[in-house]
Amino acid sequence: MIAPLVKKEILSNLLSYKFIVVFLMTILLTALSMGIMYRDFDARYADYMLIRPGAGDLIALTPPNPFSVLARGLDESIGRSYEINIHDIVVRSGQKSNNLIFRFFPTPDLLYTVQVVLSLAALLFGFDQVCREREQGTLKLLLSHSVSRGELLLSKWVGNFLTLVLPFLTVFLLALLLLQLDPRFSLSWEGWLRLGLMLFLFLLYVALFLSLGILVSTLAKRAATSLVILLFLWAALVFLLPNLTTLAARQMVEVPSVRGLSEKRQQIWTREILLGIREFDPKAGQQGVASSWRRHFDVVNHEQDAMEEEYRHRFGRLVSVAKSLNRLSPVASFVYGVNAVAGTGIEEESRYKEEVLRYKNRVYKGLMDKSMLGKEASFSAFHYRYRSLGETFREGLWFDLFWLALFTFLFVVASAVAFLRYDVR
Amino acid sequence: MMKTLIKKEILNHLLSFRFLVTLVLLLIVVPATVVVLSNDTLRGREEYSRRQGEIERYMEKYAHFNRVHNIVAPSSAPLPFHALIRGISAEINQEEFDNDPLPQVFPLTDFTWIINVLMSLAALIFSYDSLCGEREEGTLKLLLSHSVSRASVVFSKLVGGLIALAVPLTASLLLGALWIALTAKLGWTIREWLALGVILVASLLYILFFYTLGLFLSCRHESSSSSILTALFVWVFFILVVPALSPYVASFLSPTPSRIKLDRELFRIYDTERDELGVKLTKEVRKKMQEQYPILLQRLSPEEEKRRIASDPEYSQAYKRLTEETAKAWAEANRIQGAKAEKLEKEQERKEKAQTKLSVALSLFSPLSAFTYVATELSSTGINNDDRFVFLREKWHEEFEAYRDKRMALLRAQDPQKDWWNTPVKMDDRPRFVFRELSLRERVKNAALPLFLLFLLDLVVMVAAVRSFLGYDVR
């Protein structure tokens, strides 16, 4: 009995105005977002090729992550060049840093498109599923046949999910195929696995909002009421809750400002240089002068590292508090999950920074030994290995997946319960 | 008649479910945002004065002219308006090792965001069914059977809707404003309150745009369910698509060379290339001087040279000339390379400015961007404020350099032999950086264009709405 019902749902959707609007919106925005982000990736890659460190350059730099075309996250921050000096790390960023307009508006990557637009589309599909049919009287007719309410709800869910997801899948796969023409996007099996996982998250997220839509449509008496509730719920879940809870987290965990840190760094460095110059004693001989300087540089390095560690520790706490609060809205779990899989999330960025710091300390020690012992220092080039999928799972992804699935499951169960007790008259 | 119609509209809205939801949501969100943001501002100020204190303490012990500009580099405390509008002054930092990426993941809520996203959505929800809904219910036919012109029906809907939307907004903003007024430490003056007044007017213009858009779409559709679909589609386009795409499209249309490449080029010009040029020029100078003073041809060790300068006036004279000329040669090398670098930097800056301008122009297709620019300019958290900071910083640098030169000259007069660059000296009388925001008049001037554009957009949709209602089939 389910098959004809699903077919009916799909057909009635295909013929509706709703489908045309959602279809156009999905196709247009998915294609546009992937096109724009691909060009952005291309520009950043050109930057990277230009400044790629040669042999002997003490620069930590990683090429842009191909997954950033789908979920850019913090890839731009990871892709900055970190030039290692004896006293600090000089950071340079690419061509976008000086167009302030980038800071006003969010990045239109596929993650954002799905997060905002596809969720809205899912609500538009779900909002009148039950109450509209009641208003039109077709629900009564349907249930007078030998169809169980469970079957009816299931077929509505499946039929709508398919019509919702198929246009998106088509464009997405087409875009992926086109990307395969570019050798920079040739993926290992793990890469494909990541891509599959991202797609799964996209679909799960759409399912979540579709279920929410159907749930509210079984609870509300009229389709118009259902829509108003859903639109405000959508704004709250997608924007308001994650944004406000991030602000709240900031109130709970105090983190020194970036500006304060850089002032501190300058103070430490400048002070030690001054003390070094004042201590300078030409009678001490070359060895003596060198060891005096080394003492000062060690102080700089030590104090800056301690400060950095303190900052990383506090910032880590802020991130974990913010994340826990953000997850009040499953949308946050979706965003964190996709970014984690893409390797452009906050944890990845922190890990990258730690790797840069370790590289700096290796270089520092090498340079110091060279000047002390007169031996040639040679440094292996900087290399960063992204977190493996296993690590990503252990460090929070499993929870985000579980959380999204849990919400979806709860919405489905709640709508089933509500529909079983629904007054179809 | 008009009055009755408007009253009916307002009452209709006030009793509706959507009004209730909007009111409750705004009454929670606006005050919550204000409380959190003003706490944030106060904490930022505290942190700022703590940092300034640290700088003062540092300067007392270690102030020396060689590296002091790194220590006293200008920064500004959070502005009063940050209690309501964050603008671009948020800490998104690309040039420091540490950055705070959280706002990039979830942009923080502020008043601009509430108007931009929540209120535009609410406005569409208020108006998407205002005409086709009445047609579906049959009341539109009844209404027009009375001696009411169609234009006055649309007009009363516009006025009634706008008032109904303004009520929750103003009420919630008043609560927020009360908090700000009671938090005296935020330091709001008459200037901030006036600016807020203009921002409120701009908000109403912005809301009016979306309300009228909904009205227009509701005359173009038979049923309210298809009207809301088109409305949301257009909303997505204006709110999410146009603004977010505009800087990217601008960066493709008007690309700028990579900053990193420029930095490297500058480094090369100032360092390697300058040294090569300097060495070349000094060689020429030495040759010329040796022709003039053959005495300089002798090769001497540093000790012998010192003795010679002390004992032989002729040698000393020649040596002095050589040092002078060498210094001139280096100055010339610095000047040439400096001019080269400046040209490159100017070119880069020109290209960057052009790209930013194009981004602004493209984004202005959406009323969201127009409102964002109005709000950030008036609250002095926008692009022009950023420019002003850069301008004042440059000015301060010049002042500080003049101060340094003066002090160094005085110190050298005391003891010419001493290395004053690396000696701690008192600098209590140094020029201090003070950030003064733009005056209200300047801000209004900067906000005038987007404000006018907002007004124009309102006019366009209004004309469109009235025209399509005049031809609407009310049956």
Image (cartoon, coloured by chain):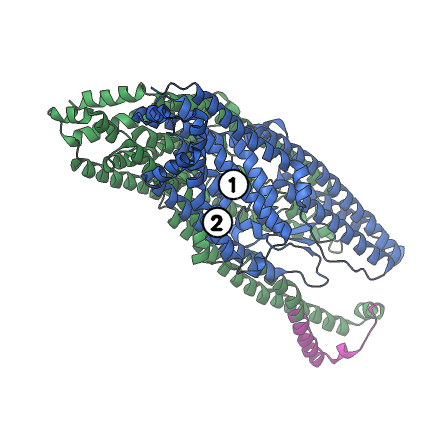
Chain colours: A blue, B green
Q: Which badge, 2 or 1, comes first in the chain's sequence? A: 2
Q: Position of residue A361 (x, y in %)?
A: 76, 49
Magenta residues, dominant SS class:
helix
Q: Magenta stretch: residue A40 in it?
A: no
Q: Image quarter for residue A50?
A: bottom right
Tell me the element at label 1.
helix
| Span highlighted in magenta in the image | B277-302
Q: Nearer the viewer, residue B272 or B289?
A: B272
Vertical placement of residue A12 versus B250, above or below? above
Evaluate if marks 2 and 1 touch, with contact meaning CB atoms under 8 Å apart: yes
Residue B287 among magenta residues: yes
Image mark for residue A172: 2
Chain ID for label 2? A
The residue that mark 1 highlights is: A202
Residue closest to the eye, B138 or B329: B138
**Residue at horizontal 23%, vertical 20%?**
B7
- Type of amino acid at the residue the image marks with label 2: Phe
In the picture, measured across the screen, residue B108 lies left or right of residue A351, that is left
